[in-house]
Amino acid sequence: SLIGFTLAVGSGLLSLTFDEVVRANTTLAPSINLIDSLVGSQWLTGVAVISTNDLVLNVTISAIDLNAMKMRLMFYQGSARVELASGAVSDMFGNPVNAIASLTATTVLADNIAPAIVDFSVNVTGMYIDLTFSEPVIASSVRMN
């Protein structure tokens, strides 16, 4: 069974802790639903397992899912819950892990990684500049000096 989890919003690292060793070669998406009780929930459509068979399964959340959560300002209050579908993960003998209806995060680390400009273009005819950032930003917070 899933007994705990941590979420690092900035890096998109989700660490799931189980009560027994689980297989790392598993397909989790779309079996994980991350929930912010103030904003809503996000079913993860893309994750990559980055750990080996262990009690803790570390996964990275896809950029699409992570940016969708950031655009909705999810998890900025420092709390999160998770739902895990039955059979999303198996133990070393192939037995599916039980479904979890709602489990509160042990730790939620806020997004502390500043956005960076990754591309830009200048339109002299329309007299504007297009800026592309590494993550969603609040448009009104962009200052042009």
Image (cartoon, rainbow, N blue to C red):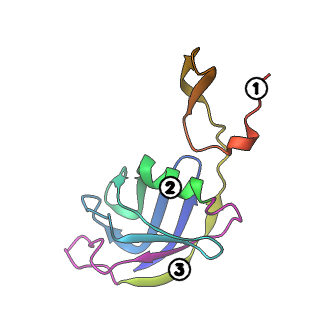
Helix, strand or loop status at disc 3: strand
Segment colored magenta: 73-98
- Image position of 2 (left or right of 46): right
> Majority secondary structure of the magenta segment?
loop
Which residue, given by chain and number where applicable, does mark 1 sit on?
A: 144
Residue 9 placement: quadrant: bottom right
Q: Residue at coordinates 48% horizontally, 60% vertically from top-left?
A: 15
Q: Is residue 17 left or right of residue 31?
A: right
- Which quarter of the rendered picture does the N terminus lie within? bottom left
How busy is the neighbourhood of tag 3: few (under 14 within 10 Å), some, or many (20 plus)?
some
Marks 3 & 1, CB-CB < 8 Å contact: no
87 relative to 28, above or below: below
- Residue 129: x and y, percent? 61, 23
Q: Which residue is mark 3?
A: 103
**Residue 75 colored in magenta in the image:** yes
Question: Marks 3 and 1: which is nearer the front?
Answer: 1
Label 2: few (<14), some (14–19) or many (≥20) C-alpha neighbours in 10 Å:
some
